[in-house]
Amino acid sequence: MILTYASQQDYDGMAGKGNAAWAAEDFAAMGAFMEKFNNELMESGELVETRALAAPVLTRRLGSKDGQAVVTDGPYAETQEVLAGYWIVECESFDRATEIAARLADTPVPEAAWAKAYADIRPIADGRDELVG
């Protein structure tokens, strides 16, 4: 699984709001890149699923306090990063998944967004025995 992260500030920027507002052309370029990236993974037979996630402001977090469920609505602090999207790929190796994720470095985004961008690559566990490293 390839996981990408963002903050509410990043989502605001993509919407053209705030100090780090993206130009419409920047958002369109990112969208075109992602469409091409996803299509190439579909054509290679490696893409299982991909999804982008809505802005953190639309998130609810469930926790507990004193044995009771506690629900907190977003937004969270602007510096807190949350899962922004993911790709599930079926490929020959962990190294191949890393190669695929490295292609995300070519995503056209404004410099302010690029400076904070990263992705995680994690195997999906098929059972309890695979949960620990």
Image (cartoon, helix red, strand yellow):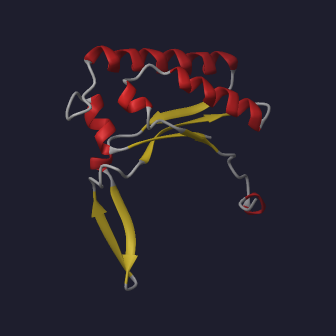
Q: Quadrant of the C terminus?
A: bottom right
**Vertical side of 56 occupied by 51: above or below:** above
Percent x, y of residue 104: 55, 26
Percent x, y of residue 114: 43, 30
Q: How many marks?
A: 0
Residue at the image point whose x is 52% and y is 14% from the top: 36
Question: Front-most of 23 and 90?
Answer: 23
Residue at the image point whose x is 70% and y is 52% from the top: 125
Q: Quadrant of the N terminus?
A: top right
Q: Quadrant of residue 98?
A: top right
Is residue 47 something that shows in the picture? no
Q: Quadrant of residue 76?
A: bottom left
Question: Front-most of 25 and 116?
Answer: 116
Is residue 36 something that shows in the picture? yes
**Vertical side of 106 occupied by 53: above or below:** below
Residue lying furthest bottom in this view? 66
Residue at the image point whose x is 28% and y is 24% from the top: 22
**Vertical side of 43 occupied by 92: above or below:** below
Percent x, y of residue 82: 42, 48
- Does residue 38 appear left or right of residue 90 in this picture? left
Question: Front-most of 91 and 30?
Answer: 30
**Vertical side of 42 occupied by 133: above or below:** below
